[in-house]
Image (cartoon, coloured by chain):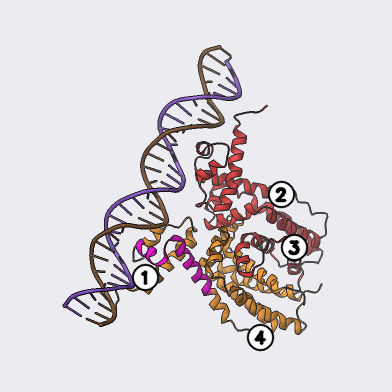
Chain colours: A red, B orange, C brown, D purple
Amino acid sequence: MERVRDAERTRAEIIDVATSEFADQGYAGARVDEIAAKTRTTKRMIYYYFGGKEGLYLAVLEQAYQHIRALEQKLDVEHLEPVEALRKLAELTFDHHEQHQDFVRLVAIENIHYAQHLIKSGAREGLASTALDVLTRIMARGVTAGLFRDDVDALDVHMIISSFCIFRGANRYTFRAIFDRDLLDPASRDHQRQMIGDLVVAHVTSRR
Amino acid sequence: MERVRDAERTRAEIIDVATSEFADQGYAGARVDEIAAKTRTTKRMIYYYFGGKEGLYLAVLEQAYQHIRALEQKLDVEHLEPVEALRKLAELTFDHHEQHQDFVRLVAIENIHYAQHLIKSGAREGLASTALDVLTRIMARGVTAGLFRDDVDALDVHMIISSFCIFRGANRYTFRAIFDRDLLDPASRDHQRQMIGDLVVAHVTSRR
DNA sequence: TAACTAACTCACCAGTCCGTACATTAGTCG
DNA sequence: CGACTAATGTACGGACTGGTGAGTTAGTTA
């Protein structure tokens, strides 16, 4: 049955369009009128459902973070040995960030705004543990097996992976402008994917 | 002699104020009126000297890039052995980015805008060679001395260093919101500085 | 089917913001 | 000094932009 009026669908469509617009133009650069024009509904509905521009942006941010949290939660690497598990985790982040440029850009935008919306929204709750749990367990197993150094902080390893995977998307354009190399070029994808794995494995297994 | 009218000083003051404002608020978020109010001159002067908001932003960007290029050019590591030279280079980038958060934020903002201004401006000319020359020479020496792998791309190494050093500043706020750790906390500074050095050295010296 | 509410449309406003026309003054040079 | 030009200040316009008031229609329920 073709519902003419469908609150859920309307809401979802607004958020989807807004995600592209905010990711594309930034918070201040995005236009409420433009977002409305790209939906099948009107600007008034944005104010009806989200209260205003900021409320809409918050909803966009929450959905984006909720998505990555869901992905992380279903990663299962307990059956792999530590080195392979660590590599797998790095590659999951690599693949996710590559496929979700909207997310990468929203994170960059949110940082420009000092993460003030993320702090307000409560979207960040539970993110820390979800992201770090798997990593912490892998590293504990690696240390116990005598494969990994015992003085490496899991959060440091997370930062190494994140910085590399975020950078490819977030700094793609200035990098290309300066070095004439597209960091997201499919031709160098496998090479880079291998590299981030090598990098973290080398880091946690290195001898001092 | 106290010149009441001083074109150079006025110009420079406008650029300095604009640098903070653009870095702080982003391109769309920054306000021409606000920039003018924070200088000792008026908005009219911005249009007199820079033509408009975009021209001013371009000037800001060019000055920021010019600054880092100057720094890179005077780095001298030829007298150090390869491993130490590489570490030194990583630490130079680390220190520069840490001390120039305006630059790091401008790069992030420029990427949000697909580097369209950087491409237009010609500020990027010469940047590639300046940044890569030193690194390429270090790596060649390392390979010749049998210390480094011979299949590592200098640009890949540059990317590893950049991503790490940029991330600390550019993603500081979301990282803190989620993990409750300030990446620029002076207490963890030396540890992280050591880490990026270890990371690249391990990468170029690792055995396959 | 009549009453009710959620979902939606339309027209409009008030404030913001980039940009400019025009007037004026400081410094320079013959 | 007097004419000229670079530098600067004032006041304002007009388009844009986030937000809203008031009314309308679809679907639901008693």
- The amino acid at mark 3 is Ala
Q: Quadrant of the N terminus of chain A?
A: top right
Same chain, labels 1 and 3: no
Mark 3 neighbour density, 10 Å: few (under 14) some (14–19) many (20 or more):
few
**What is the CA distance from the residue labelled 1 to the residue labelled 3?**
49 Å
Residue B121 seen from this side: yes
The amino acid type, in three-letter code, at marker 2 is Leu
Q: Which residues are magenta?
A: B41-67
If you read the primary sequence from the N terminus, does the residue marked by circle 4 or circle 1 appear first? 1
Q: How many marks?
A: 4
In the rendered image, which residue does mark 3 sit on? A187
Label 4 crowding class (10 Å Cα cut-off): few <14, some 14-19, many 20+? few
Position of B185 compared to A165: left or right?
left
- Observer-side mark, 1 or 3, equals 3
Q: Residue at x 49, y 62 (%)?
A: B23
Q: Nearer the viewer, mark 2 or mark 1?
A: 1
